[in-house]
Amino acid sequence: MNKTQKFALWGIINLLSAIAFLALFLVSIFFFKWWMPLPARIACLAIFPFVFFGGLFLAARKQSKKEVETDEMDISFQKIAAIISLISVLVVMCVLLNIANLLWGLNAAVPLWVLMLLFVALVIVGVLVFGVAILIQYGMGGKRGEK
């Protein structure tokens, strides 16, 4: 597994773990109407930096001294993944803005938390699609137009 694949996998795992921790907090507050006990909150917040920096260390580490940083195939995969990610972010943004239009209308004031959630959703979609697109391209073995 080269560095591009490792960073894509690290981004996906990191983002999914952040979503899981955020969902844990939000479910406990909004559905059960209670805050998590302080030791549980501290434990959840302490686990996340280990996942983040541990994965970053493993992704940035070379497997051998002969391993190259990037090559032409990595760069082409990253370009294609960036285009796919941008298109998916634009599609999701259009869908979310249309939903906001249906809920609040064109002349209503949109709360700030809605705009923040929109931004977070777009970042999540962009990172996930970028990582998945890179991993799918490597899984296909770089045989895009070949038979």
Image: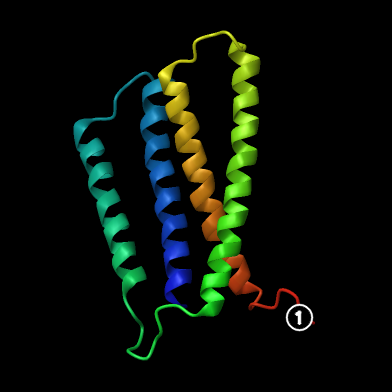
Q: Residue furthest top?
A: 107
Tally of numbered discs: 1
Q: Position of residue 18 (x, y in %)?
A: 39, 45
The residue under the point 46% across, 63% down is 9
The residue under the point 29% across, 49% down is 48
Horizontal side of residue 66 vs 88, given as left or right: left
Residue ID for mark 1: 146
Residue 57, picture quadrant: bottom left
Horizontal side of residue 95 vs 69, given as left or right: right
Instruction: Report the amino acid beneath label 1.
Output: Glu
Horizontal side of residue 44 vs 127, given as left or right: left
The residue under the point 59% across, 20% down is 100
Position of the C terminus, as image quadrant, is: bottom right
Identify the secondary structure beneath mark 1: loop
Residue 66, picture quadrant: bottom left
State the scheme by which the image is colored. rainbow
Horizontal side of residue 58 vs 147, given as left or right: left
Establish if 44 lies above or below 71. above
Q: Position of residue 45 (x, y in %)?
A: 25, 43
Pick whichever, 1 or 144, lies toward us.
144
Q: Residue furthest right?
A: 147
Other-residue count near label 1 (Cα within 10 Å), few / some / many at <14 / 14–19 / ≥20: few
Pick whichever, 143 or 31, lies toward us.
143
Residue 10, picture quadrant: bottom left
Q: Position of residue 135 (x, y in %)?
A: 56, 66
